[in-house]
Amino acid sequence: MKTTHTSPDLHFGESDAGSDSENITAMTEQDAENAAAYLESVIGLDLKYPLESTEHVIAGSPIIVRESEPSSIIAFTLMASEYRTELHKVLEPAVPPTATPDGNSPGSPSSPPSVRSPRNEFARTTPAEHAQELIEYAMLHAPLSHLKLQFTSLVRTLFKCKVMFAPQFDGLRRCSGCEDSYIESLARCATYDAQGGKSGSAFLETRDKRFIIKQVPKAEMDAFEKLAPFYFEHMYRTYRDVMHTLLAKIFGVCRISYRNAATGKSMKMNVVIMENLFYQRTCSRVFDLKGSERNRMVDETEGASLTKQHLHDAIWNDTLFLSKMNVMDYSLLVGFDESSNQLVVGIVDFIRTFTWDKKLESWVKESGILGGGGGKGPTIVSPKQYKNRFREAMERYFLMAPDKFFVLPAEDED
């Protein structure tokens, strides 16, 4: 894999963050209330300001930033012209020299500002024949850049967002075909009940249910920073070589925060944005399968049609990659889609590496201290052994069954 050294974090929108509100002419909540009172007194219109005090309109952006919906901070950042400009600079070596940042050829008149869309910037500046080069450069060769943006609303609320591995994730979203829907989805989110999860992490779900936003501790963020270059290389190889993979795609990692000076409320969290495996699916039964018998209850009589060879190949490829990256304790999330009679599967929780606390957990469970025994093997021994156990367990869970293409061998007349 060819990558450059990690570049320093790029900061923008910070030097004059405190004075942004002086240059914004958007109406504040108080202005709106005053205007509504005037209209009611003069012509009898009873108008109410449509937004709450925790909802912020920033001039020049269609994204309403909501304190109760952290993903809107990310959506605003990705939509900001400052962010798009910095990202364009990082990816500039892969952009055809005949195109300019605004999508026009050199010497041609600029398009009106009203039709320029930062979200579609690279779709215009990169012709279709250069799309593959841009994706390859972004995921394999671009600097491992983290882009930061901070902005202030008119009610003195300071927002900050650090987009980790911005060019690499941009390339991944392009080859996955979700670069257009990603920002639109993140604009709204709600709390999400991740059934069966034992990590205690907070989960959010975009309102359109396309993506899951998971809060992760600093240890997992640090682990992903080490894993990231190899993750992008693995995902690019599966894309380029059309290899089978079951890894639930991580489309973004961010550090976000805000502080409302008026209310005193603040928030700071690290999040990963993942695909929702069950988007547009009707899955009433969901199983979380691991390569261990401990604390895992699965009805082995359940079944559904599935291409066993594809499943085998994907599990083999992904577990080999995760084992090399010293990752363990991942699991296979399985849902039965009643509308199509299909199994929906994906490997999740593959960020955490084999650290000293997992080694201690393994030793305790092997020795039987604190009730760690019980006649079954330890949950974790090593990434390599977990890989082997995981593969063996999946072979047991998913049995081959004849389908419409299966032909019984002819019986021997003798």
Image: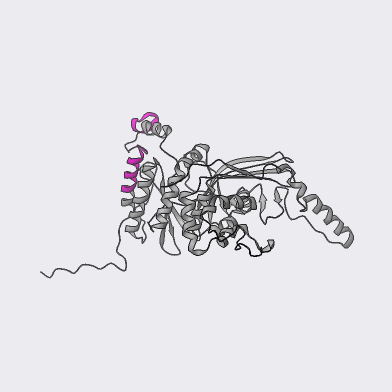
Q: Is 177 left, or right, of 315 in this rendering?
A: right
Quadrant location of the C terminus?
bottom left
**Considering only vertical position in the picture, is 328 above or below 96?**
above
Q: Is residue 92 left or right of residue 414?
A: right
Q: Residue at x 67, y 42 (%)?
A: 14
Query: Compared with residue 127, is residue 14 higher up or lower down, i.e. above or below?
Result: above
Looking at the image, which residue sits at the far front? 107
Q: Quadrant of residue 180?
A: bottom right
Give the image location of residue 137, x and y in percent.
48, 53
Q: Is residue 154 visible?
A: no
158 or 396: nearer the eye?
158
99 relative to 153 in the view: left or right: left
Callout count = 0
Q: Residue furthest right?
A: 42
- Relative to 336, is 25 on the left or the right? right
Above or below, 111 relative to 260: below
Confirm whether the magenta stretch covers residue 376.
yes
Nearest the viewer among 242 and 378 is: 242
Specify the segment rendered in magenta. Answer: 365-392
Picture coordinates of residue 280, whole percent (x, y) = 50, 61
Q: Residue 120 in the image: state x and y as whole percent.
A: 59, 60
Quarter where residue 99 is shown: bottom right
